[in-house]
Image (cartoon, rainbow, N blue to C red):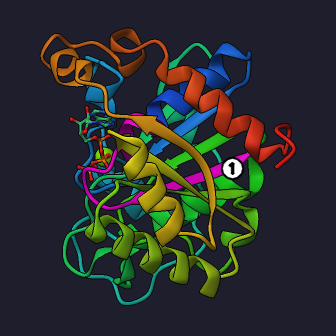
Amino acid sequence: MKIAISGKGGSGKTTISACLSKVYLEKGKRVILIDADPDSNLKSTLNIKEEITPLIELKEIIAERTGTKPGERAIIFKMNPEVDDIPEKFFYKNGNLLLGIMGTVKGGGLGCMCPENAFLKAVLRNLILKRNEVVILDMPAGIEHLGRGTTEGIDWLFIITEATEKSIETTKRIEKLAKDINIKNIGVIGNKIESDKEKEFLKEKLSDMKILTFIPYFNEFKKSELEGQTPWEAVPEILNYIEEILNKMEGKDGR
Ligand SMILES: Nc1ncnc2c1ncn2[C@@H]1O[C@H](COP(=O)(O)OP(=O)(O)OP(=O)(O)O)[C@@H](O)[C@H]1O
Ligand SMILES: [Mg+2]
């Protein structure tokens, strides 16, 4: 299962990515979790204290694999560098979890033609197309990480949305991008829901989209961040909502 998670800034992408990995790990699955958001915070959400080097900072490795020199502006480089060994060597490992942090691509984002990008994209392609683990991608609101050669490997795109006009605008924009690149399954997760009215609002505004679940607004999350708790330590029932998502994905609820 390969799942990409997107949505407006602050909507809950990282919280939900982390909880999703927790549920799969509890089921005994091996999970690769990727922080693909330049403004990354997955590590702190998971309350991991160890240093994790973002992939973009592996200058020597990137140079070696792409056939360039570190720090030099390269005009010719390998678009398909060898990266099979990267997760085992450079990701954070804990039991059945591998966590990789992509880091920030300076200037031009992932669109730029540079060795760093070729390397990051190769790592993503490798994870999505070649690995057997559950792969979960915590992405920014842009989905440019998913491009030719990777989209066909993505089973689901989850778009996290709050019950606000702005969040819905972003959701629709992401949906359009995802359809343009032929993502197979797109599901919406309503997050920080405070009333039935908010649910109805989302159902109406997103009537043509598949809504996987509505997660309530939990006050406890604020406190949990201060105290260094994971989301499920602060609010154990959050995992029930994740289970509901998995059931809907498999069509178990009959809808
Ligand atoms: N259901 C919820 N109830 C209350 N607070 C929530 C809920 N889900 C997430 N939050 C809080 O909202 C904030 C943003 O969540 P999170 O970091 O998961 O979002 P994000 O979409 O990854 O943000 P960013 O765009 O900054 O990466 C965090 O403080 C988180 O604890
Ligand atoms: Mg985030």
Please state the horizontal and vertical placement of residue 88, each as a whole percent of the image. Answer: 57, 33
Residue 18 position (above or below residue 85): above
Q: In this view, does 19 lie to the left or right of 128?
A: left
Q: Is residue 136 magenta?
A: no
Q: Where is residue 27 in the image (x, y as percent from the top left)?
A: 73, 17
Task: Judge left or right: residue 36 versus residue 134.
Answer: left
Which contiguous range is marked in magenta?
A: 1-16
Q: Relative to 127, is 45 above or below?
A: above
Q: Can residue 46 be seen in this view?
A: yes
| Residue named by callout 1 | 2
Judge the density around disc 1: few (<14), some (14-19), many (≥20) Cα neighbours within 10 Å.
many
Q: Which of 162 and 4 is in front in this view?
A: 162
Residue at x 46%, y 76% (from the top left corner): 172
Instruction: Work out which residue is located at the far front of the displayed protein and give it.
Output: 197
The amino acid pointed to by label 1 is Lys
Outermost left residue: 226
In the foreground, 185 or 49: 185
Q: Give left or right: position of 138 versus 45.
A: right
Q: Residue at x 84, y 45 (%)?
A: 251
Label 1 within 8 A of ligand 2 by Cβ: no
Q: Which residue is drawn at 34% across and 83% down?
A: 112
* Residue 170, percent from left and from top: 36, 72
Give the SS element for disc 1.
Answer: strand
Name the quadrant containing residue 115: bottom left
Figure quadrant of the N terminus = top right
Decide which of 217, 36 is in the foreground and name it. 217
Location of residue 143 with respect to 111 vertically, above or below: above
Q: Position of residue 131 (x, y in %)?
A: 74, 45
